[in-house]
């Protein structure tokens, strides 16, 4: 068995169970040193709030950066030890082989200390600078020192730019108002699909009637695809296996079909049409319309004969006004002949939405998940006909 390392895979609190599920699903497709799907186990060591500590060979843990749609950052543990005095801390830091990661580039150090005798973050940083003279404040590579309960954990960030910043975030021009984070959007799509066999999704149109910049639909489209455009920190590490630095790496992986027969985005804001066309440009089976979800001229309400699922992230009435309210939204969503509805609602809005949804037809809850979106407590609920 290849030498194992510990990786800390960070996600948003509330997404941990799904992250574990996602890692288990991705795992068999990750490549070993011979560029073949691996047969190594992934060992889930410990769940924390907002992450999973796993044990895995280096080549596999690093590849999670390409394939996890729920993780925001992946740290590789370099050392962990109990420490209550600065000389011992200095001694341990000095022995960490930072050159194996940053042989040619500089790196910065981030320190977080709490509930420990060595609580002074500035002092710890000074000590790190002494142990690792190559350290530079502005460098993009990063080593993290976390001190908690007198346990010092030293990790290297394998990711760099956070994983939720997929390519279309590169320019603010292509973002609507209150866009959802890509990692949360991917989570909602996974929950919406739940146990549905992937093959049957090729018969389903997925529509977001309040699509904004189209994040939910874009994530649905690429849920099974790897991300190969971003530059990850690990690609520059000296220890990273050559295979993972190859330009044509993507072509070595099993290719998966895109999900859903067609993606359909509508929004009442004319300005979002250009944004949607740009953000969904790589999707060929799509439709984009300017329409009001409460209006009779909404195309989704009139013309669908195929299997239809709805997913949406409406304004919450906090940062974005939503004067029509959640009861009317529930009613409007129920009027489309869909067979599954997923909606992100702010805390306290569920009862109104459910009342509207059940006014003329009968729906039941299939799943509910709770998390924060932009600091607001929300729930993602999936409804199916009762
Ligand atoms: C919270 S944003 C959606 C953000 C989207 N999920 C994203 O990631 O970009 C809500 C969207 O609903 C749209 N909207 C508000 N009221 C609407 C209505 N009655 N019909 C259709 N769209 C509406 C807004 O224009 C806005 O783009």
Image (cartoon, grey):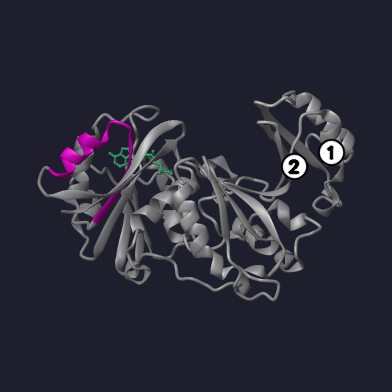
In the image, taking residue 45 as reference, residue 240 lies left or right, namely right
Camera-nearest residue between 336 and 93: 93
Q: Is mark 2 within 8 Å of ligand 1?
A: no
Where residue 318 sits: x, y (%)? Answer: 37, 27
Q: Secondary structure at mark 1?
A: loop
Nearer the observer, 298 or 2: 2
Residue linked to disc 1: 135
Mark 1 nearby-residue class (10 Å; few <14, some 14–19, many ≥20): many
Q: Is residue 202 something one can see in this rendering?
A: yes
The residue tagged 2 is: 143
Q: Quadrant of ligand 1?
A: top left
Query: Residue 276: horizontal and vertical position, in percent?
Result: 43, 50
Q: Position of residue 239 (x, y in %)?
A: 79, 59
Point out the residue furthest to the left here: 360
Q: Earlier in the sequence, mark 1 or mark 2?
A: 1
**Does residue 352 belong to the magenta stretch?**
yes
Q: Give the residue drawn at x 38%, y 61%.
A: 286
Answer left or right for 22 relative to 84: left
Q: Residue at x 66, y 71 (%)?
A: 32
In magenta stretch: residue 313: no
Give the secondary structure at mark 2. strand
Per the rendered image, the range of residues in magenta is 340-358
- Camera-side residue of 367 and 45: 45
For the image, the number of numbered tags is 2
Classify residue 242 as left or right of residue 287.
right
Give the residue drawn at x 39%, y 50%: 188
| Cα distance between the residues tagged 1 and 2 | 9 Å
Q: Are marks 1 and 2 in contact (CB under 8 Å)?
A: yes
């Amino acid at each position: 068995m290849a030498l194992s390392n510990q990786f800390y895979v960070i996600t948003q609190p509330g997404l941990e169970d799904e992250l574990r599920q996602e890692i288990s699903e991705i795992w068999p497709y990750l490549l070993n040193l011979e560029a073949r799907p691996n047969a190594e186990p992934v060992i889930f060591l410990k769940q924390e709030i907002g992450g999973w500590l796993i044990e895995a060979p280096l080549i596999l843990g690093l590849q999670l950066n390409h394939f996890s749609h729920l993780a925001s950052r992946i740290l590789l543990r370099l050392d962990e030890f109990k420490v209550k005095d600065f000389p011992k801390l200095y001694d341990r830091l000095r022995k960490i082989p930072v050159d194996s990661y940053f042989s040619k580039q500089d790196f910065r150090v981030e320190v977080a200390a709490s509930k420990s005798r060595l609580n002074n973050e500035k002092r710890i940083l000074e000590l790190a600078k002494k142990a690792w003279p190559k350290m530079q404040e502005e460098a993009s590579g990063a080593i993290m020192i976390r001190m908690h309960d007198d346990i010092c954990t030293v990790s290297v960030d394998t990711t760099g730019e956070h994983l939720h910043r997929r390519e279309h975030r590169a320019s603010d021009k292509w973002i609507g108002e209150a866009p959802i984070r890509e990692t949360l959007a991917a989570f909602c799509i996974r929950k919406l699909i739940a146990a549905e066999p992937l093959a049957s999704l090729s018969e389903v149109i997925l529509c977001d009637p309040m699509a904004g910049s189209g994040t939910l639909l874009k994530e649905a489209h690429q849920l099974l695809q790897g991300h190969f455009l971003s530059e990850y920190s690990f690609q520059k590490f000296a220890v990273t296996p050559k295979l993972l630095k190859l330009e044509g790496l993507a072509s070595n992986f099993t290719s998966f079909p895109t999900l859903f027969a067609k993606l359909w985005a509508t929004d009442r804001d004319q300005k979002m049409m250009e944004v949607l066309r740009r953000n969904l440009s790589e999707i060929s089976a799509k439709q984009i319309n300017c329409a009001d979800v409460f209006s009779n001229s909404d195309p989704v309400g009139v013309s669908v004969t195929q299997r239809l699922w709805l997913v949406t992230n409406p304004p919450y009435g906090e940062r974005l006004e939503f004067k029509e309210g959640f009861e009317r939204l529930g009613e409007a969503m129920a009027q489309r002949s869909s067979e599954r509805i997923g909606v992100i609602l702010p805390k306290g809005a569920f009862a109104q939405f459910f009342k509207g949804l059940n006014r003329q037809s009968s729906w039941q809850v299939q799943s509910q998940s709770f998390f924060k979106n932009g600091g607001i407590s929300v729930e993602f609920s999936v409804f199916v006909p009762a």
